Image: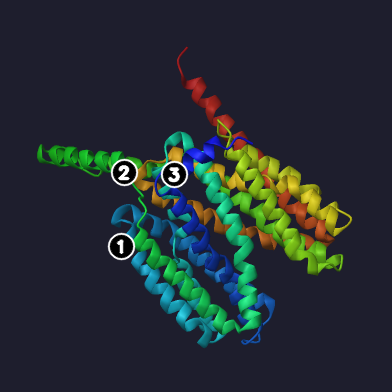
């Protein structure tokens, strides 16, 4: 695997520090879900379904808040946009161990809406810090960091909750999130390039001159920029993002169901570690490619390769059969982030990345229940088959729609 693309990325001043910061800052966020779940089923004395509702409440909050938080970064700057997230995180996580279940649901929604947007800020910053030809490699390195965070966070969360207490774990996670937010404010990585800022200034001057001359509204250019957020290509990318996380979230549930049926739940950590390693390797290979690959094609491959995984006769075969699909996990998410950077101008890129984060949350919220219904009906194999088939159908539908639009556009071009 050629390493030159990654050396080029890491040679850019500030990128290595940003990537390392991203890994550490995401760890408490990835631990949050399991820590809250253990608190609900432990001290609060509720079941796993109730714990799942807390996770759903947080997911809904993040899906609602991510575009708004991203737009705040675009319009107010990173530091001002982060202040509400830091304050809300301190209040939500500082009170969560001491409230009942119903109030915890409310806090989960509030915390989700105002969650620290580290995932979106990382990719928004990388997009302006590295040259355009290195963005794929930079996004791939960031996806590796995400996998490392997800491999470490939940395990550390369980360790804190079981060795200390769930209340101590919640306070620790919240404290780390607040520290991460303050560090990000101090770090203040760029979210706009010098060229983008200069272009905005020129557009503002032109708009004022046009208004002074009796022209039309000066908000035309920003309006056109925001219009890119609802272009067919952008909607296709967001659809692919949501569909990919349908497959991934459903796979998580199906793996646990498969291991439970085999009486091998003790191997859960090892199986997910194998999945993470496969995703990391796939992401690193994708980052060396010289041309982008359509997110819909990667989604199609992910769906096709996920369908037969549930037929594995043993946990070890399960780990092996998961590797091909795992190798497409990081690439499909990386490709969607890369596509968004290409499709929307800098002026609205924070909001666009926020919608990307919302699509990830929506897909996760759909994938786990979809797999659960299939598992209850026909067993663990059906969970893999259901979410894999959903990925295939949605990918083919997206490819078909884009092909139809291209055909119609070509037909309108005069001979």
Report if residue 373 is visible in the image: no
Q: Give the residue pinned by disc 2.
A: 223
* Res. 230 mark: 3
Q: CA distance from mark 2 to mark 1?
A: 23 Å
Q: Give the residue pinned by disc 1.
A: 80
Which residue corresponds to the image point at 68% horizontal and 47% vertical from the top-left?
391
Name the secondary structure under disc 1. helix
Q: Earlier in the sequence, mark 3 or mark 1?
A: 1
Q: Is residue 109 above or below residue 165?
A: above
Would you call the spot at circle 3 few (<14 residues within 10 Å), some (14-19), or many (20 or more)? few
Would you call the spot at circle 1 few (<14 residues within 10 Å), some (14-19), or many (20 or more)? few
Q: Earlier in the sequence, mark 3 or mark 2?
A: 2
Please state if 287 lies on the left or on the right of 342 as rendered: right
The residue closer to the viewer here, 234 or 69, is 69
Q: How is the image coloured?
A: rainbow
Q: CA distance from mark 3 to mark 1?
A: 27 Å
């Amino acid at each position: 695997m050629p390493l030159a693309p990654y050396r080029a990325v890491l040679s850019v001043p500030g990128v290595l520090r940003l990537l390392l910061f991203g890994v550490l800052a995401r760890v408490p966020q990835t631990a949050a879900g399991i820590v809250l779940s253990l608190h609900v089923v432990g001290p609060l004395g509720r079941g796993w379904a109730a714990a799942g509702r807390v996770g759903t409440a947080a997911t809904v909050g993040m899906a609602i808040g991510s575009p708004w938080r991203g737009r705040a970064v675009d319009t107010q700057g990173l530091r001002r946009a982060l202040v509400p997230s830091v304050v809300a995180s301190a209040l939500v996580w500082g009170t969560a161990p001491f409230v009942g279940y119903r109030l915890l649901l409310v806090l989960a929604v509030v915390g989700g809406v105002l969650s620290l947007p580290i995932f979106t800020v990382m990719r928004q910053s990388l997009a302006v810090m590295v040259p355009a030809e290195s963005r794929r490699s930079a996004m791939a390195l960031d996806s590796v960091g995400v996998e490392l965070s997800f491999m470490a966070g939940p395990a550390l969360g369980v360790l804190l909750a079981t060795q200390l207490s769930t209340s101590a774990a919640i306070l620790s996670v919240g404290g780390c999130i607040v520290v991460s937010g303050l560090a990000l404010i101090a770090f203040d990585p760029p979210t706009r390039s010098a060229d983008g800022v200069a272009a905005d200034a020129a557009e503002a001057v032109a708009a004022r001159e046009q208004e002074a001359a009796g022209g039309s509204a000066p908000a035309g250019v920003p309006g056109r920029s925001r219009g890119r957020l609802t272009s067919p290509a952008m909607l296709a990318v967001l659809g692919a993002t949501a569909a990919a996380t349908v497959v991934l979230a459903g796979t998580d549930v199906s793996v646990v169901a498969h291991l439970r049926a085999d009486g091998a739940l003790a191997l859960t950590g090892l199986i997910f570690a194998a999945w993470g390693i496969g995703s990391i390797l796939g992401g690193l290979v994708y980052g060396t490619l010289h041309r982008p690959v359509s997110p819909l094609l990667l989604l199609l491959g992910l769906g096709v390769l996920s369908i037969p995984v549930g037929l594995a006769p043993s946990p070890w075969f399960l780990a092996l059969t998961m590797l091909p699909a795992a190798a497409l996990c990081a690439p499909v998410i990386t490709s969607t982030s890369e596509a968004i950077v290409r499709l929307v101008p800098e002026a609205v890129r924070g909001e666009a990345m926020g919608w990307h984060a919302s699509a990830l949350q929506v897909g996760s919220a759909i994938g786990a229940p979809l797999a659960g219904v299939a598992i209850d009906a026909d067993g663990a194999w059906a969970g893999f088959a259901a979410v894999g088939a959903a990925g295939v159908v949605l990918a083919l539908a997206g490819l078909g729609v884009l092909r139809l639009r291209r055909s119609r556009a070509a037909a309108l071009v005069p001979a």
